[in-house]
Amino acid sequence: MSFMSSEQSRRDAFKLAGLAGLSLLVASPALATPEEVASAIGKAYGDRKFASGKIKMDVPEIAENGLVVPINVEVESPMTDADYVKAVHVYAEGNPLPNVISYKFTPACGKASASARMRLAQTQDVVCVAEMSDGSLYKAKATIKVTIGGCGG
C-alpha cells in the first residue's frame, strides 16, 4: 500500500524533471575566450614570431546560420620538397575548444588548400596559423558575425 497519492507522485516527478533540465543548462560547456586561443597558440609555438601574408581565408563576413559556416583556407606556397606548407591550424574565439580544425600537408599535395564547415556559437574571431617547412609561421584573422547561434544559441 502506497503512502503517497498519485497527485503527489506526479508533482515529484515534474520537480525531478525540472531539476534535471536545469542541471543540463548549468553544465553547458564554457566557450573559449580570446585569451584561451592566444594561450593555445602560445603552447603550440612558444614565443616564435608570426608573419602576415601567404594565408588567404575565405569566410563569410556575416553567417546567417552558425550551424554551417564555410571556411576555405589557402596558403601561398610552391609545394616543392624544399618549400612547402607543413600544417594549417584554425582556432575560434568562442567555441568550446580553441582549436577547431587542423590540416597536414606534404609536397605531394600540390596545393595547400582546404575547405570545411564549422559551427560558431556567436560572433567571433577565427585565427589561422600556417606552419612552413622552413620553420616559419604565418597568421591571419577574420571576424565572422553570427546572427543565429550554431552551438545551441
Image (cartoon, grey):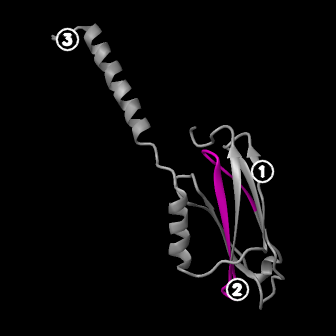
Identify the magenta region. Answer: 115-137
Q: Closest to the observer: 48 or 20?
A: 48
Going from N to C along the chain, the mark reached first, 2 or 3, is: 3
Q: Position of residue 111 (x, y in %)?
A: 82, 74
The crowding category of the residue bearing disc 3, from other C-alpha atoms within 10 Å (few below 14, some 14 to 19, many at least 20), is few
The image's mark for residue 60 is: 1
Real-space CA distance between mark 2 and mark 1, rounded to the nearest whole angstrom: 29 Å
The correct choice, above or below, for 50 with respect to 94 in the image is below
* Label 2 Cα neighbours within 10 Å, binned few <14 / some 14-19 / many ≥20: some
For disc 2, the marked residue is 133
Of callouts 3 and 1, which one flags the residue occurring earlier in the amino acid sequence? 3
Quadrant containing the C terminus in the rendered view: top right
Q: Nearer the viewer, mark 3 or mark 1?
A: 1
Q: Is residue 142 magenta?
A: no
Q: Say what amino acid the circle numbered 1 marks.
A: Pro
Mark carried by residue 78? none
| Residues tagged 2 and 3 counted as in contact (Cβ below 8 A) | no
Question: What type is the residue that disc 3 sits on?
Answer: Met
**Mark 2 or mark 1, whichever is nearer to me:** 1
Which picture quadrant has residue 77? Answer: bottom right
Q: Which residue is the site of mark 3?
A: 4
Sequence-wise, the earlier of marks 2 and 1 is 1
What's the distance in space between the residues labelled 2 and 3, CA to CA?
73 Å
